[in-house]
Amino acid sequence: MKGQTERRLWNEKIETMSRDELRELQWRRLKRQVAYNYERSLFYRKKFEQVGMRPEDIRSFEDFQQLPLMTKDEHRRAQEESIQTLGHPYGPMTITCAPIEKIVRVNATSGTTGVPTLYTLTQHDVNVVNEMHARKYWRAGIRPGHVMIQALSLSMFTGGLPLSQGIQHLGACVVPVGIEGGTKRVLDFIRLTAPVAIIATPSFGLYLIEQCPKLTGKDAKELGLKWFFCAGEPGGGNPEVRKLLAEGFGAKIFDHTGGGHAFHGISCDEPPESYSGMHFVSEDHCLMELVDPETKKSIEIENGAVGELVLTFLDWEGGPFMRYAYGDIVQVFTAPCECGMPGIRFKIIGRADDMLIVKGVNVYPEAIKAAILQFRPKVTGFFRIVLNKPGPLVTPPLRIKLEYASSVRDGEIPSLEEQMVKHFKENLRISPKFIWVKEGSIPREMKKTKFIEIDKGEQ
Ligand SMILES: [Zn+2]
């Protein structure tokens, strides 16, 4: 059967646009969007006033970059002020630009750092989100007839409902079981509904591989899952984690991002031991900028560039982001990808808040983790960065406490350390000091692990 299901991309017209065409489309939409934001949101109007600009003063992308950035904290504060003053968070004191009659959905970030930040969507925005999910899963090979089990948090958080709706929009079948009901329930529904794909956090995937034989008497490979879509954590970009998932499930591993908003990406079909970032699939609805995480100065987007991610939604009605500095540090690749799929790519390197600076070199705990995992099974992969005061500035050398595996003899440690220091020098441009501890010495945490330990006594 040729036709619909044979095409490679969900939206060929948009997804194969040249850079120039795309830039032109972004520019047209940006001009309209900034005028809309200025008109309808006092929060955004203040941003213009801070630099003495009006929407008509923006005649180029460079002009646009003169507008101040916004942060999650500001977003939360504006929400709170609005609730206290007006009794609701729906504008005009916040970034919500559409009237309440047009808002059909509120999504939120999970708020791990405190109060959730709210995303407000009109039906138009919901359609945009659905389109982006369809673009991602279509690239990965999902088609009508495929059943996908959704084992992320099912709540209003951005991965929950929006993602499920997006799968329906593509015409595939979603089983939104969620993880709230526990591992056994996910396994029960895998048996009952025969999915070929699962969407989950990488850590839940690893847990499922371990628990599956105990709970079902079967290996995770026998579940019939051919696709594993990682979300919600950075692990989906880690070659070691990808390999474990691929082997454990006998599935292709895709890393993807994007919830109930306009920033979406998915990695390509590649062997688990390599990872070349996520293809940015929503550039027609989202302008990406990079800034220096310290000085906040713009960094040009070119192959290999690293910086803090700044997002502006284009053609968004509810609560459009405008120069929103989200706190993620990304590396961008503009060179064509080996997979042949179009679009620039980005790799999430870490959080700006976690950044450490060692002799002028920016280092992220996630990057340290990835480097350590390269040396499994000689190391367990559990580690802590030991600082004598909170970062980002670190007096060298950077101290890393890590576990050697119980199979490693004391005499082998010096040569292991030598190899590791070399790897760190070449890949991260730092020469750490390793503090070796026995397997099992570092506390295991199920939640997002804190990699940094403050030890005032040493140094
Ligand atoms: Zn690719």
Image: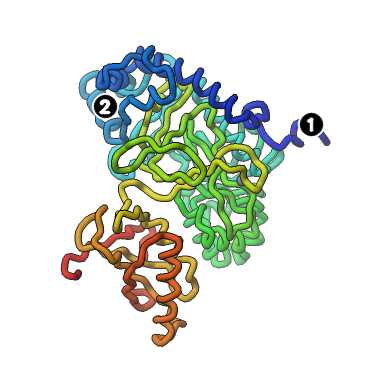
Which mark sits nearer the N-terminus, 1 or 2? 1
Numbered badge on residue 276:
none
Measured as percent of width and height from the top left, residue 205 is found at 52, 56
Identify the residue position indicated by label 1 in the image.
Answer: 3
Mark 2, residues whose alpha carbon is within 10 Å: few (<14), some, or many (≥20)? Answer: many
Mark 2 within 8 Å of ligand 1, using the beta carbon: no
* In the image: residue 368, left or right of residue 83: right
Spot occupied by residue 51 in the image (x, y as percentages of width and height): 27, 21
What is the CA distance from the residue labelled 1 to the residue labelled 2?
Answer: 49 Å
> Can residue 336 be seen here?
yes
Q: Which residue is mark 2?
A: 78
Q: Quadrant of the C terminus?
A: bottom left
Q: Give the residue type at disc 1.
A: Gly
Furthest-left residue in this view: 457
**Horizontal arrangement in the rendering, residue 283 relative to residue 8 (left or right):** left
Q: Secondary structure at mark 2?
A: helix
Q: Residue at x 31, y 63 (%)?
A: 385
> Please, is residue 247 above or below residue 355 in the view?
below
Disc 1, SS: loop
Q: Are marks 1 and 2 in contact (CB under 8 Å)?
A: no
- Label 2 sits on what residue type? Ala
Q: Where residue 42 sits in the image (x, y, percent)? A: 29, 17
Q: Report whether 56 appears left or right of 229.
A: left
Among the 4 quarters of the image, the one containing residue 247:
bottom right
Residue at horizontal 45 percent and vertical 50 percent from the top: 233
Residue at image point 43% right, 71% down: 420
